[in-house]
Image: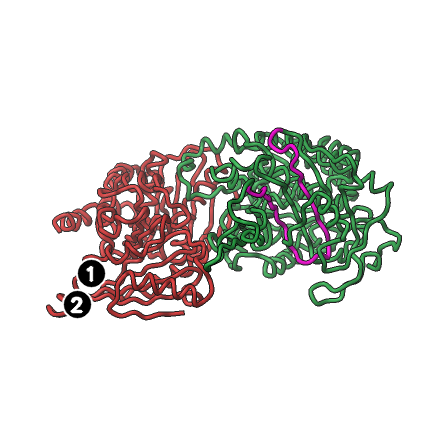
Amino acid sequence: MKTDLTDTTSSKINKALVLGRRAIGTPAVGMVLTLVIVTDEENAYDALKAANEASREHPSRTLVVIKRVSRSPRDRAKARLDAEVRLGADASTGETVVLRLYGEVVDHAQSVVLPLLLPDAPVVVWWPVNAPTDPASDPLGALAQRRVTDTYAAEQPIQELTARADRYTPGDTDLSWTRITPWRSMLAAALDQVVCEVTSAEVEGEEFNPSVELLAMWLAERLKVPVRRSKSAGPGLTSVRMETSSGPIVLDRPDGSLATLSIQGQPDRGVALKRRETAELIAEELRRLDPDDTYATALKFGIERLDEEAATLAPTPEQDAVTAPAEPAAAPAEPVEKPAAKKAPAKKAAAR
Amino acid sequence: MSAVHGANPLRDAADRRLPRIAGPSGLVIFGVTGDLSRKKLMPAVYDLANRGLLPPGFSLIGFARREWQDEDFAQEVYEAVKQHARTPFREEVWQQLIQGMRFVQGDFDDDDAFEKLKSTVEELDKAQGTGGNFAFYLSVPPKFFPLVVRQLKKHGLADQKNGSWRRAVIEKPFGHDLVSAKELNEVVHEVFPPDAVFRIDHYLGKETVQNILALRFANTLFEPIWNRSYVDHVQITMAEDIGIGGRAGYYDGIGAARDVIQNHLLQLLALTAMEEPASFDADALAAEKTKVLGAVKLPKDLGESTVRGQYAAGWQGGAKAVGYLQEDGIDPQSKTDTYAAVKLEIDNRRWAGVPFYLRTGKRLGRRVTEIAVVFQRAPHSPFDHTATEELGRNAIVIRVQPDEGVTVRFGSKVPGTQMEIRDVSMDFAYGESFTESSPEAYERLILDVLLGDSNLFPRVEEVELSWKILDPIEQFWDKHGKPAQYQSGTWGPVEADEMLARDGRSWRRP
């Protein structure tokens, strides 16, 4: 059932939740967390849809905070809160409250959200777009144990990643990191199969995809070897290649769905590695609410180090001959070109 | 395998997103055309693959008498998966799985077939990189166990060579009494070392059963009252609404007690009653379970404290049901029990004097498995008798299936101007607080076999101790009387109600 409240307050919303529950005959259900989605009107529908699907796995109270844009001084001065309370079939397995904030109250969203949090249950804040640079000190982010951002949706993903590394607080996490879990687990499984020493690695993926950087940094950090990145047309990540003492290990996914794992001395094998929907990513994210230390160490590894070490690797000619027969020109040029291209916007971001 | 894990720089205990993926391995299913294989094993393998928990190159070999080609087998698996898998069907996962699917046709005494199985295994090691690691799942009637196991040995399939493993998975029944269980164990252990034999009790793979340990040992709320000072008695129930179906050949002569109490219910009893293990590893768990099963004591008068029954004709949930003796293939003189209830006591400081009532049966009211820990009444009540007339005993009920969860029953004041106290329940349901996609028992257990993790598998000692508990009861039943008749669709024979009434208690209606 759906209740619309205009020009309302948090306590009226709470009352509507209790009344609604009583009306549909289900008393307080076992909701395990409060998920706060902070978004604009444009992205609200998709985000809520994903959250509702994820709530099948994690029944939760979902609060969608939509900050409306005010277009005149009069609008800006007038504060208003509208709410849409959804229960039962309209809200998947939990409860959903869509909050629309107008005028001044936009800057005080935490005052609306705080009274609506479930008692004692963990709070997760998710910004599908326009995440603050420092989520932990954002007034809404400060309410949460877990703060989920998505650098993939950012204008300049790579710079944003660097900014996140600088401001990292335990509990921060990013969906571009979540996206690579299947890759990481498959690469770890591949190394279970061969006893070998990894000497270098290469991660290939589409441009402006921070998952490439995160995967590369994770590999570099764990394996302590130079890792370089290269561009492809996508979709998403397309391949990872590890040079090892017992020949190369290649995980190649050209179509975003079925990948091939090739290990020297072993037959090629098909592996399902489909790109996942946002709902699945959010569900994975909600599975563990403790700080993700592995993400922290990978993120803090530093994108610059990736480039430096890849550059030192680039001159080894025999390596290249083995690594990239298909793209002889592009691959060596890449690492040299990339840092230069990135330096300038990085400064811009800092200045802002 | 653990050595390899330690050397893998991409593995890190702190990285909890990475699932436990089984190492390179394959699964051989004997009796692959059977019901269990179609409804549970194949879908479980697919679900595991879909969750990304199987290693690349995982292989599945079916072994059966049917004249199938690899493609026919793949088709059969495909249909089983489409029909019974819990996760949505995804083509790319299927494509990954199908590469390692093989079928070997033959009888269990057919040497050529086992040679072919051996060459298939070797071929898969080359083609799929399974590394010689294979688990043999014996989904066959127990009388074939010795034959299959000996064939595996004869053809060198059970040999664990240079770092690879071979494991055997067997299903209940593990014998039909202590002697036969010992014989079976000897046969199996002759070929596979004890740590390579996995006995499947699928109840232990269920989330709710594993949750018994979490509930008891991760909380402070329950353990202090989990003893004879507060607990009045414990009821463990496993009821089925179906009859024996087409399993007449298997069921007659075995009966409910051997089929269910010996394994599932005694395991549930062990988990409910055991002391806190030193750690959650397989050895520590087994030690505590063995200890508590060893402390189980049978009541002196078995006639007074055990009941067996047979379902008679009646109506079950709106459908007419025939009685057990009228089922096809059942001897009308059969004394096999389709209902069994026993009272057990545990001789230790924690439980002395607290009876554990175990019951199981077919064609009962509805399908349900639960553990009810019923508490004593408050020693003194400040409320007068009329106020607490409707107040029962407090209880904690662990609902194992269906509608998994935990219920706490306690008294609460009825709103109004009078003081009146009535039972209410506080409920935790898995479906509400957690995922609907929690793994199926077989998924978890197959993964554990591939990982070599034996936490959730009963050991030889537990199986033998369980038979020691049940054997005297079965022997008593053989000599005395015959099963009581109970109408299908009810909660068992009146004798069972009388048994509890003698102790001043009554069965819960689950």
The residue identified by callout 2 is: A70
Residue farthest to the front? Answer: B384
Q: Nearer the viewer, residue B325 or B127?
A: B325
State left or right for residue B54 relative to residue B507: left
Contact? badges 1 and 2 (CB < 8 Å) = yes
State left or right for residue B59 relative to residue B65: left
The residue identified by callout 1 is: A106
Mark 2 is on which residue type? Ser
Q: Secondary structure at mark 2?
A: loop
The verdict on a common chain for dots 1 and 2 is yes
Q: Nearer the viewer, residue B257 or B330?
A: B257
Task: Specify the segment rendered in magenta.
Answer: B349-378
For residue A93, above or below residue A133: below
Q: Quadrant of residue B66?
A: bottom right
Q: CA distance from mark 1 to mark 2?
A: 10 Å
Position in image of residue B251 (x %, y %)? 78, 50
Q: Secondary structure at mark 1?
A: helix
Asked if residue A221 lies in the magenta stretch, the reply is no
